[in-house]
């Protein structure tokens, strides 16, 4: 498995921005899919975005398209989620996840490594 540590969450006003980071270690990530999920209070965990550790293909949930950008820094073994135009409904705990596959799945069952999560709160 891969060890993942998220950071960058916090409190922000609606319309603001945050950048989440996910530091990865433990394995060579070249054949891994990386993703961000989130869980809002009282709701199930949902897919946000995914990106292969190599290649340029990305996948986003419809609710964040055009506002969030997933990226990585291979030299730093770090995955990012740039979140712009934040809305109160984006409030959730955000989790980084990794799967030993090149398939960018949206189902959390695909991913076998998870970080501890970072809280994002967007005030109206």
Image (cartoon, rainbow, N blue to C red):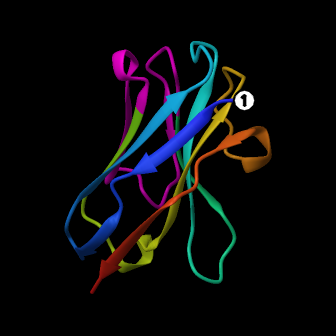
| Magenta-drawn segment | 51-78
> Which residue reaches farthest bottom?
124
Secondary structure beneath label 1 = loop
Closer to the camera, 23 or 45? 23
Q: Is residue 76 magenta?
A: yes
Side of 112 relative to 79 (left or right): right
Side of 81 relative to 84 (left or right): right
Residue at x 32%, y 76% (from the top left corner): 122
Q: Is residue 23 above or below residue 65?
A: above
Tell me residue 2's x, y (percent).
64, 30
Q: Is residue 69 magenta?
A: yes
Tell me residue 34's x, y (percent).
57, 33
Which quarter of the image is occupied by the N terminus?
A: top right
Residue with the mark numbered 1: 1
Closer to the camera, 29 or 71? 29
Tell me residue 14's x, y (percent).
24, 76
Residue 46, image quadrant: bottom right
The 10 Å Cα crowd at callout 1, few under 14, some 14 to 19, many 20 or more, is few
Q: Is residue 116 above or below residue 54?
A: below
Residue at x 24%, y 63% (from the top left corner): 85
Closer to the camera, 89 or 5? 5
Tell me residue 6's x, y (percent).
46, 48
> Which residue reaches farthest right?
109
Residue 98, image quadrant: top right
């Amino acid at each position: 498995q891969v060890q993942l540590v998220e950071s960058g969450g916090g409190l922000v006003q609606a319309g603001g921005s945050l950048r989440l980071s996910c530091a990865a270690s433990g394995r060579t990530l070249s054949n891994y899919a990386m993703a961000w999920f989130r869980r809002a209070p009282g709701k199930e965990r949902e897919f946000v975005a995914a990106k292969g550790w190599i290649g340029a293909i990305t996948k986003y949930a419809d609710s964040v398209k055009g506002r969030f950008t997933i990226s990585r820094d291979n030299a730093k073994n770090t995955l990012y989620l740039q979140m712009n135009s934040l809305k109160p409904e984006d409030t959730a705990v955000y989790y980084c996840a990794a799967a030993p596959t090149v398939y960018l799945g949206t189902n959390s069952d695909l991913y076998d490594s998870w970080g501890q999560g970072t809280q994002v709160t967007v005030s109206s």
